[in-house]
Amino acid sequence: SNLSAAYWDQDDPYEMSGDHCFLAGGNTRLIKALCEGVPIFYGKTVNTIRYGNEGVEVIAGDQVFQADIALCTVPLGVLKKKAISFEPELPERKLAAIERMGFGLLNKVAMVFPHVFWGEDQDTFGCLNEYSHQRGEFFLFYCYHTVSGGPALVALVAD
């Protein structure tokens, strides 16, 4: 309710600069290349993260993983719920930011059509609904025809 329709789109001056692109084969190829030689453990639930000048310990059940640094990329809801204990506690400014931030649900709906009707040179396009209670419904469309080989759109639906 506080945004101007002129600045609703994701390519506004406050976003990252540069061209957007789709990776043929999906982001998994990039992730696999970045993870080459890095041990990855699946099915672990982190209970505690201890950190300080001597490094970090990530505790998952009865296992302790030690490292120089750790990058914590858990969902905001996990942080709000305090499902992971930080020792020492996170700084007050970070706790306050976690408390202030809101979050919702973002779904993607993939659709395949008989032909490309949205323009061959389109990467994305958006839709600003007339009714404010429907503004998150199908507001941004990614055109996948250039990377999928077929007339496919992926729509974002936010709640």
Image: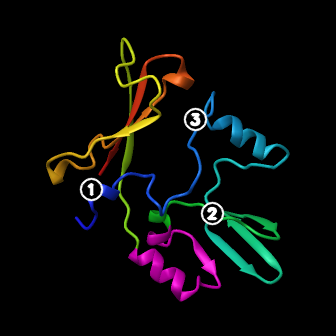
Residue found at the far bottom of this picture: 92
In the rendered view, tell whether residue 37 sits above or below residue 121.
below
Image location of residue 31, percent across then percent down? 70, 42
Where does residue 114 sit, x and y in percent of width and height? 36, 11
- Which SS class for mark 1? helix
Front-most of residues 79 and 115: 115
Q: Earlier in the sequence, mark 3 or mark 2?
A: 3
- Residue type for callout 1: Ala
For label 2, the crowd category at 10 Å Cα-Cα, with few meaning under 14, some 14 to 19 and many 20 or more, is some
In the picture of the structure, the residue carrying the numbered disc 2 is 46
Frontmost residue, 16 versus 147:
16
Q: Which residue is mark 1?
A: 5
Which residue is at 72% across, 67% downward? 70
Q: Is 113 colored magenta in this rendering?
A: no
At label 2, the amino acid type is: Val
From the viewer's perspective, is 77 left or right of 16? left
Indicate the secondary structure of the residue bearing disc 3. loop
Q: What whole-number distance in Å separates the C-alpha atoms at marks 2 and 1?
A: 42 Å
User: Dividing the picture into quarters, in which one does residue 58 lie?
Assistant: bottom right
Q: Crowdedness of circle 3 by 10 Å Cα count: few (<14), some, many (20+)?
A: some
Judging from the image, what secondary structure is the residue with disc 2 in?
loop
| Residue ranking furthest to the left | 131
User: Tell me, what colour scheme is on the image?
Assistant: rainbow
**The one of 71 and 128 positioned closer to us in this rendering:** 128
Residue underneath mark 3: 22
Magenta part of the chain: 79-100
Q: Quadrant of residue 6?
A: bottom left
Query: Along the horizontal axis of the image, is 69 left or right of 76?
Result: right
Amino acid on which disc 3 is placed: Phe
- Picture coordinates of residue 10, whole percent (x, y): 43, 52
Q: Nearer the viewer, mark 2 or mark 1?
A: 1
Foreground label between 3 and 2: 3
